[in-house]
Amino acid sequence: MKHFLSISLFTLLLFGCGEPSQPVAKPNKKQTGKETYTMYCAMCHGISGDGVGTVTLDRPARSFIDGGFSFGNTVEAISKTTRSGIPGTPMPPFADVLDDEQINKVATYVRSLAPTVQEVDIEDTEMVVRNRPIVARGTLPPVQDGLQLHPRGVVVGNPDGFSYEYRADDVRLLAIRQGRFVSRADWGARGGSPLTMLGKIIVLVVGGNPQPMFTTLNGEPLHAQLVATNTLGTYGTISYDLLDKNGGKYATVEELCKSTTLTRALIEQVLTINTVKPFQIQLPNDTVMDESTTVPIGTATRTIIHATKGSE
């Protein structure tokens, strides 16, 4: 079975989202990064890296010549993305097809396609949220001393002046901020530095290091695999699938956070859930939820309440 899966994955990587006009050769360790890129990447990302390939995708591929990278623009970050793929997108993992040396060559070539900014004014690096939500992806610095850096992070900024930091490898809300959004230090030169968070922390979820919030009915943790983000509504959303250790799907969750200004300053973490197997929600410390923590099969909504600093 494992051999069959490897062959299937190899076929997927070779043929991508459409049928090539002729078979693609197997990888060769002596190939340059450009040659391997042409063989495996150009059909989606274009020969020049402009994101215009020969296959039709449900969303545009990244344009490398415009500096478009999902999780950082260093060779290390690009290698990691190439190796593991991006769940919820047509970008597959290449770890079973290319070895580390080949992936590094491809990443080095892809990085050479991107522009280099020699001088960047500080005001040009700040992302400003105006009348619609925006999302920043990149490396998250530790939310406080002693905690880990997250190479894959997502920050959702809403027009109400609040922003929400998530780790993206196993989606978890880490912190809530109020004020300015983020500055992208990684836009300067060919950095890949962590995002600079500009807002003041008003909620640190379980000290900035929360455990998995979802478990099976037997208490086994479920993995929250990132699917997508969306900024079309009033509030930015983040969607993820809940999977068990064998990859079995329990639910798809679309999450948004919003502030309330009633008698207390509160943040509502609203989960819209499509469940295929019942599971449990393990509430973070210092939060409350009026609904049941057991989520049955079907469509449900759960709202977790976070009290901000200074709330009574």
Image (spheres, rainbow, N blue to C red):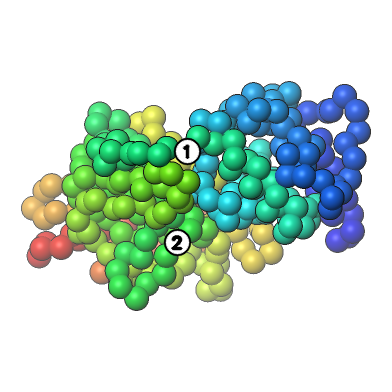
In which quadrant will I find the C terminus? bottom left
Marks 2/1: CA–CA distance: 24 Å
**Residue 234 locus on image (x, y percent):** 30, 33
**Residue 222 locus on image (x, y percent):** 55, 64
Q: Work out whether residue 242 or residue 100 is closer to the camera in this orientation and state it.
A: 100
Q: How packed is label 2: few (under 14 Cα within 10 Å), some, or many (20 or more)? A: some
Q: Work out whether residue 264 or residue 88 is closer to the camera in this orientation and state it.
A: 88
Say which residue appears at 35% left-offset and 31% top-offset.
233
What amino acid is at disc 2? His
Of the numbered discs in the image, which one, if any, rests on residue 24? Answer: none
Would residue 217 be seen by someone viewing this image from the given angle?
no
Q: Residue furthest bottom?
A: 146
In the picture of the structure, the residue carrying the numbered disc 1 is 116
Would residue 222 be seen by someone viewing this image from the given angle?
yes
In which quadrant will I find the N terminus? bottom right
Q: How packed is label 1: few (under 14 Cα within 10 Å), some, or many (20 or more)? A: some
Does residue 58 appear left or right of residue 296 in this picture? right
**Dot 2 or dot 1, earlier in sequence:** 1
What amino acid is at disc 1? Thr
Q: Residue 24, located in which quarter of the rendered image?
A: top right
Say which residue appears at 68% left-offset and 53% top-offset.
104
**Residue 73 locus on image (x, y percent):** 51, 46
Count of all numbered marks drawn on residues in the image: 2
Of the numbered discs in the image, which one, if any, rests on residue 150? Answer: 2
Q: Work out whether residue 123 or residue 144 is closer to the camera in this orientation and state it.
A: 123
- Mark nearest the camera among 2 and 1 is 1
Q: Secondary structure at mark 2?
A: strand
